[in-house]
Amino acid sequence: MKLFPLVSRSRLNRAICERDEARAQRDAALIEKDAALAQRDAVRRARRPTEEIIRLVASFSLTDFRPLGVLRSLAEWRDFSASDICCEALQTDARLLAAREREPEWSLLGYSTPAEQLVEFKVDTEAGGRCADGRYFPNLPERFVCPVSNLNNRQRLMATLLLQAVSSREDCAIIYMPEQVTPFFDWARGTLHGHNVIGSEYLGEGHCPGAVIDGVRHEDLLNLSLADASVDIVVSNDVLEHIPAPEQSFRELARVLRPDGEILLHIPFFLNEGASRKRAELIQGTIVHHLAPEFHGNPVSPEGSLVFTDFGWDVLEMARSEGFASATVEIYHSVLLGHVGLHPFFRFRRQARRAHPPE
């Protein structure tokens, strides 16, 4: 009796093929299953930040947004720059940028306070560049553009500070901005209903302060037409570096502000410099250059605007000596709001109105 029946070669080969085909199908099914699991995990990982952002946005309040530091001197900046909170913010930025350093354009999901909604902030290398090793770097203050409001990183932060300033007011605020022909002014006029937003541009020496030319108000920050104590808030985005005598402009702005009024100010600022540098001066009507001429974009002049001053920490004392009771630098950072990078903004406050002494 044969223990093993004879098997024809053809049947054996067919069985082997069937077995191999079954194994291939099983392997393909396993691969497909693994791919499906990997895709599911990828979706979950991608969803997790979005869900976290949505959760954070749902609980966000303007009153919750605060500076990382409020500084009054170069020494305080040095202490702050060595602090854990500052180092943590810088490390967060470094990780975010390192993950995208090979991409010339990318986006960041976050909440735009001017648009009051979730957006994909646009990031590219305009005003930035590319390293020799192929890594891209964006200009942090000028990018992270909100596609709804068309405001960049620093402009959106200024918008948030302005929204905070007016949110607690019950009366109409008079707000002056020396930037009438900008997306920021358009946003403010279209958003701050119930408040009086006044804008202007400097249109040249041949015009009287307060004159309106082609729908644009002309003002000179060295000689404003605004009445004494007539303004609650002044907002200035990258203007005062183009003024030949910034001390006089501070004096004028202090004059037109009401008691308890304030300036929200952004200027190019050298955080590690104690003293400001005069790049140029206006002497008897002639511009005298002390450093190579530097120009910034100007919406009303194709030639741009000459930079007269590189500001250092003495700008705070400059403001105090011209009529402001307090002058501080506030440092902000928030990836949720698309404020990548440490952003120094200035807040100058007028002297509070004194109560009348009892009779």
Image: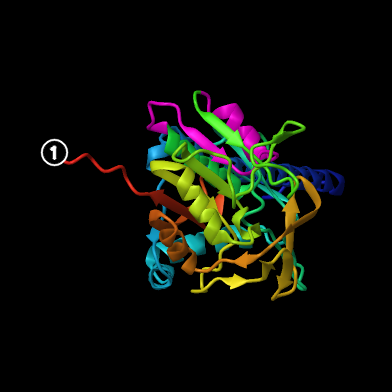
Residue 305, position in %: x, y? Answer: 73, 56
Residue 308, position in %: x, y? Answer: 66, 65
Residue 351, position in %: x, y? Answer: 34, 49
Residue 316 visible in this rendered orientation of the protein: yes
- Residue, x 62% and y 63% (percent of image)? 98
Which image quadrant for residue 147? top right
Query: Between residues 175 and 100, which one lies in front from this camera angle?
Result: 175
Q: Is residue 10 above or below residue 329?
A: above
Task: Count every numbered label the image shows and give the total.
Answer: 1
Q: Is residue 192 above or below residue 357?
A: above
Crowd class of label 1 (few under 14; some 14 to 19; many from 20; radius 10 Å): few
Q: Amino acid at mark 1?
A: Pro
- Callout 1: SS: loop
- Residue, x 60% and y 67% (percent of image)? 310
Query: Between residues 98 and 64, which one lies in front from this camera angle?
Result: 64
Residue, disc 1: 358
> Furthest-top residue in view?
194
The magenta stretch spans which residues?
167-193
> Furthest-bottom residue in view?
290
